Amino acid sequence: MHTAILGGPAPSTASRDPPLVTRPSKPRPARTQLAQAPPRWSRGSPGPASRPAADSGPVPRVTWPSRPAPRSPAGRAGGSSLGRLAGPGSPAPVVAMAAVVAATRWWRLLLVLSAAGMGSSGAPQPPNILLLLMDDMGWGDLGVYGEPSRETPNLDRMAAEGMLFPNFYSANPLCSPSRAALLTGRLPIRNGFYTTNAHARNAYTPQEIVGGIPDSEQLLPELLKKAGYVSKIVGKWHLGHRPQFHPLKHGFDEWFGSPNCHFGPYDNKARPNIPVYRDWEMVGRYYEEFPINLKTGEANLTQIYLQEALDFIKRQARHHPFFLYWAVDATHAPVYASKPFLGTSQRGRYGDAFCHCPAGMETPFVTVLQVWRRLLSPSCRYGDAVREIDDSIGKMLELLQDLHVADNTFVFFTSDNGAALISAPEQGGSNGPFLCGKQTTFEGGMREPALAWWPGHIAAGQVNHQLGSTMDLFTTSLALAGLTPPSDRAIDGLNLLPALLQGRLMDRPIFYYRGDTLMAATLGQHKAHFWTWTNSWENFRQGIDFCPGQNVSGVTTHNLEDHTKLPLIFHLGRDPGERFPLSFASAEYQEALSRITSVVQQHQEALDPGQPQLNVCNWAVMNWAPPGCEKLGKCLTPPESIPKKCLWSH
């Protein structure tokens, strides 16, 4: 049964959308400006800083051009089309909820009317959609977010020519539930990607998991088919590996990638190596046909994933609107990069004497765990992986430009959860000023980098303070296609078009779930923790640390602490690191508690938890004989089927 947060078990009532929060707010600027971008997409180091862009009027209206036939780069007028973006709109204050709802309906009506003639030759087409989902990349890993080595020139340029969201969240601090939420627009507690085997436990989809994405869930690519989209996933699926959970059974038309993380290598006896698929059938396995050298960190997977994306864009850009979901995993441990990028990052190179030591431990005396980490990862290669991903994204955006479809392609970049500090610094990223990382519901576990780019539509150089969620990409993508979300279920994602195109802000809560438990909620700039927990003392003493160097007494607890009667409340604007809880006696605490409690109660009253999918494990369902294995001579014999309860330690 679902565990309620404030009181007893949550009632299971008819599923419906919880109402958006309305409250009077002091006007504040919705967005501020970033510096203008350098003149071309970068293949090397970032260019010199440039002056801020000037205000040049309102955000442009959405229009869909007819899909042109691509021209060769030589036939274009001189200069980059990126230099001809519309300027930023005037800063907009926080608006009343009724006005935002009206604006959202207006955009939806405009998009539906524009989509009406899609079937005829030369008729307006809805925009292409390119979602770039990183794996375990942290808020602080991009130059534009303050990473000091400034090794992400293409992503920084994407921000300078588009919109940056500093307050954007994943729906869960772990990969599988977060991805399920993005593609369904629904919290994991609704779509079934959680466990009830233990209280407040993270769970995901290792290859022994029996469950996966339910047939009852409607995924984004399935819905986009109604508007004529062709969809492809490149990279990690992670919503179940058994045949009924295959991405092509849930709306995607093409797939190149893997159903699970690239853990291994395994001996194919006790556990099989993870398969790599092209569409319906496997074409090899990690560490076999697709090698990953754990000693050097060398693997060509990011280059393969890049080529898959480029080929798909070239094929589809001249014919159909496309949805490309590029879900690469190079920044997930074991981290990898191709040979040209290995050892190139300033974030740590082979031979640096102490690049493997956590902050504050730069001494010759290292622990057994540190020695193991050095042997596993001698090159501090996380920065190398980030550089290769940045270079790949630059090539994709440049191709959109060369094909003259950049102004008809909506691009969004984010990550599935915070950086895995347990793997840092050699195989993990940075969460900037935020507390802890992946696996936790502190800010470092769920606040993500987020960039939107749509030349000619999203004004350049904007910073928007809208509280956003990866689930919003579901609803926003449907709105771009002129579609409405399913009306027979609760949808947690918002349509971000008013924020993206007009700079408007909407009051909405962010809910932080860990398994079956709502751990925290944010409304405005106040965050209330109803439960706190990092991981158990037992795991912590074994060297598993989700918050290295960040102990906050009474907050980063190693016992699951119940604060439901008197939540810990932080002001994230003044205290983004969640180190100084508000005084229980203060008027600010009482006002914030009243508002947040009301929102949480509305949420729980409307909540109808889905059937948990991550409770049962069985070694017989692992990737022993995936479709296509017989053609490659790669079929393995599974063991006896023995279903059992999955054990989730944290």
Image (spheres, rainbow, N blue to C red):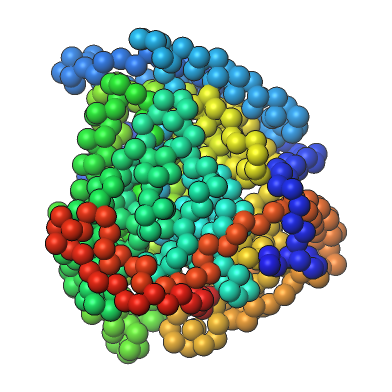
User: In the picture shown, does residue 225 fall above or below 632?
Assistant: above
x and y percentages locating residue 99 in the rendered image? 73, 27
Towards the viewer: 618 or 501 = 618
Q: In this orientation, which residue lies closer to the viewer: 452 or 514?
A: 514
Tell whether 32 sits left or right of 553. left
- Residue 581 x, y percent position in the rendering: 71, 67
Give above or below for 243 relative to 287: above
Of the pair 590 and 627, the residue shown nearer to us: 627
Most foreground residue, 333 or 401: 333
Q: Residue 317: tell me if it is visible.
A: yes
Q: Residue at x 49, y 84 (%)?
A: 539
| For residue 236, side relative to residue 4 (left or right) | left
Query: At 54% across and 46% down in the image, what residue appears?
Result: 217
Q: Give residue 87's position: percent from left, percent from top.
A: 47, 23
Residue pictured at 83% horizontal, 63% vertical: 586
The vertical placement of 576 against 396, above or below, is below
Q: Quadrant of the N terminus?
A: bottom right
